[in-house]
Image (cartoon, rainbow, N blue to C red):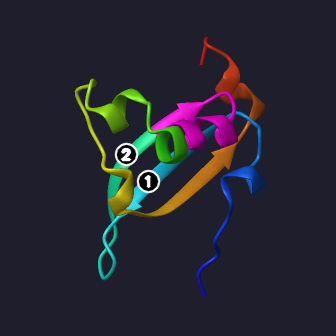
């Protein structure tokens, strides 16, 4: 069974996240890191003003084709020295 979250149900913690595309066979579409997971995914999926969503970075994604997002939370992800 798929778990569906609202953006506002997501943690506001530092996290590394992976966006997947595909339905029958998943493939990694994008890997990112953010100091606030909720805010970062909001930027990708709701506001659509992240550099990867607007096409202003070397990598790009179309949020409409992302089928799954997983994440790992750790306070050290917020530290610029890691």
Q: Which residues are magenta?
A: 32-43
The quarter in which the C terminus is drawn is top right
Query: In this image, 74 relative to 24: left or right?
Result: right
Q: Nearer the viewer, residue 3 or 63?
A: 63
Give the Cα distance between marks 2 and 1: 5 Å
Marks 2 and 1: CB-CB under 8 Å?
yes
Residue 19's tag is 1
Above or below 21: residue 30? above
The residue closer to the viewer here, 38 or 1, is 38
* Neighbours of disc 2 within 10 Å: few (<14), some (14-19), many (20+): some
- Residue closer to the observer: 68 or 16: 68
Task: Check residue 30 in the rendering and tell me which mark sits there, or answer none.
Answer: 2
Q: Is residue 55 magenta?
A: no
User: Residue 26 at x, y = what percent?
Assistant: 34, 70
Residue 7 image offset from top left, x and y in percent: 66, 52
Q: Which quadrant is home to the N terminus?
A: bottom right
Q: Is residue 40 magenta?
A: yes
Question: Looking at this view, is 68 or 78 the one in front?
Answer: 68
- Identify the residue at image location x=73%, y=37%: 74
């Amino acid at each position: 069974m798929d778990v569906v979250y609202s953006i506002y149900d997501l943690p506001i913690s530092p996290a590394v996240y992976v966006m997947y595309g595909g339905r029958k066979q998943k493939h990694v579409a994008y890997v990112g890191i953010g100091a606030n997971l909720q805010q970062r995914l909001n930027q990708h999926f709701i506001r659509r003003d992240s550099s990867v969503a607007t096409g202003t970075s070397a990598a790009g994604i179309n949020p409409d084709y992302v089928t799954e997002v997983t994440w790992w939370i750790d306070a050290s992800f917020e530290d610029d020295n890691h």
